[in-house]
Amino acid sequence: MGHRTVISREGRRYRTDVCATLAAMKVERLDG
């Protein structure tokens, strides 16, 4: 169960990073 918790936590952080990157790209595109 501990492993599953760690994986879910990592996945959530990774998903947040991806969302932030996509948002930054979208902002750059609007600015450009």
Image: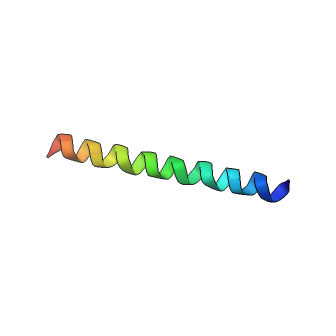
**Left or right placement of residue 14 versus residue 5 in this view:** left
Give the percent coordinates (x, y) of residue 20: 42, 47
Q: Which residue is at 36% across, 47% downward?
A: 22
13 over 26 or under it: above or below: below
Q: Which residue is at 61% across, 53% downward?
A: 11
**Left or right placement of residue 1 versus residue 27 in this view:** right
Q: How is the image coloured?
A: rainbow
Give the percent coordinates (x, y) of residue 31: 17, 42
**Left or right placement of residue 5 versus residue 30 in this view:** right
Labels in figure, total: 0
Give the percent coordinates (x, y) of residue 28: 23, 47
27 over 21 or under it: above or below: above
Q: Name the residue at the right extreme.
A: 1
Give the percent coordinates (x, y) of residue 27: 26, 42
Q: Quadrant of residue 30?
A: top left
Depth order, front residue of 31/26:
26
Q: Which residue is at 85% across, 53% downward?
A: 1
Q: Name the residue at the bottom extreme.
A: 3
Q: Quadrant of residue 7?
A: bottom right
